[in-house]
Each structure stands twice: as C-alpha cells, then as structure tokens.
Image (cartoon, helix red, strand yellow):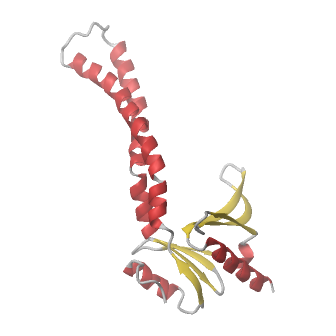
Amino acid sequence: MFDQNIPAPLKAFAEREFAGEKLVWAARPDVKLAFLMSFAIWLFAIPWTAFSLFWISVPVGALLETYAGINVGAPKGAPSLMMGVFALFGVPFVLVGFGMLLAPVWVLRKGVRTLYVLTNSRLAILQGARNVEVVSIRPQEIVSLSRKEGPDGRGTVILHQGFERDSDGDRQEKKIELGVINEVRRVEQLVLDLKKRAAA
C-alpha cells in the first residue's frame, strides 16, 4: 500500500491509520532538495556564530584575567559587572547560531519522518516515527489552494483554510504547506478533485 522506503514504524502506523480508506496518493517530501536548501541558513550561520563567539570571548577573557589576578588596567567592580552583562547578552546569539548550524540536520530528520497521504475522504500529514502526530484536513476545511512549481515539476502546495485569531487576538491566516514534492501540479489537481467531490 505504501512505499517501501518509508521508515518501518511510520509505514506500519499509516497502514493502520488508513485501513478503511481508499488511498489516492502518498509521498514523502523531497528530503535531498530540502536538505540542500537549508544550507543557505547554514552558510549564514557561520559568520553569525563566529561573531557571537567573538562577542562573548572578549568580556570573558577580560573577566578571567581580572579573577586570575592579572592587572589589565581597568577599575575594579563596575567593569567586571559590565563585562559579565556583555557576555550574558551574547549567549542567546550563540545558541541561535548553533541552532542555524544544525538546520540541515533538523530538516533531514523531519523530512525522513514526514508522510503526506491523500485518501478519498481527507488529506493527512503524518510526522514522527514511534510517536506519530497526525494532522487531518477535511476537504470542506480547504478554502483555496496555491502552488509553487519549479521547472522540473517539483514544488509545494499550500492549503489555505481561512483566518483565525492568535493568542494576542491578532488575525492570522491558517494554512498548511506540503513541502517539496514531485509532480506538484498533479497533486494540486488531486486535492481539488477531492474538494469538488465533497462539495457535490
């Protein structure tokens, strides 16, 4: 029923989940392309992280000299406090930098554990391995679709589901994106066909 390349736990879960439904289409996002695209973030993360580490190293070095008893010609007390503040201010930037450096790993890990499934009654996104999260979208919940397509026929399909209020009360569009998939035009048409059948 499902592709053999799907991780065994996810495949077994999908076969149980859709046992009573007719499978129309199932695929995983193009992990390789998403992995390569994430390298733009990785490249940006290199100077970001290097500068953040430099930002921290200067005050930390000064503090180490001060507490090691080496006289650097600075007044006691306040400069040490300021140096500590500067060092702490740089910590979040270093953590963000490390997060961006790991972006390709997270993208690869998420892509391998993601499965898109279209049946005769719903579109579902499965994510996970042993503990699988299932997001089901009924055809009547889809207001409109948009497609981004490359010259090779790969691209993304975005399902627009109207608007909702966030925790601050601001109006936000509710939408779900099917990552980089093959034959994106065909997939869009399959979803539109499901929506038409549900409306009829």
Q: Name the residue rendered at 30%, 25% in the picture.
A: 60
Would residue 94 appear left or right of 20 to someone viewing this image?
A: left
- Count the labels in the image: 0
Closest to the observer, 44 or 128: 44
Vertical comparison of 140 with 20: above or below? above
Q: Name the residue rendered at 48%, 85% in the picture.
A: 2
Closest to the observer, 39 or 103: 39
Give the position of the C terminus as an image quadrant: bottom right
Closest to the observer, 115 or 168: 115
Q: Name the residue rendered at 19%, 13% in the picture.
A: 70
Location of residue 34 in the rendering, given as x and y in whole percent from the top left corner? 48, 60
Q: Name the residue rendered at 18%, 14% in the picture.
A: 69
Vertical comparison of 69 with 57: above or below? above
Location of residue 96 in the rendering, given as x and y in whole percent from the top left corner? 43, 42
Location of residue 31 in the rendering, given as x and y in whole percent from the top left corner? 46, 66
For this orientation, the residue located farthest to the right is 200
Vertical comparison of 18 with 98: above or below? below
For this orientation, the residue located farthest to the front is 151
Quarter assignment of residue 74: top left
Location of residue 106 in the rendering, given as x and y in whole percent from the top left corner? 42, 58
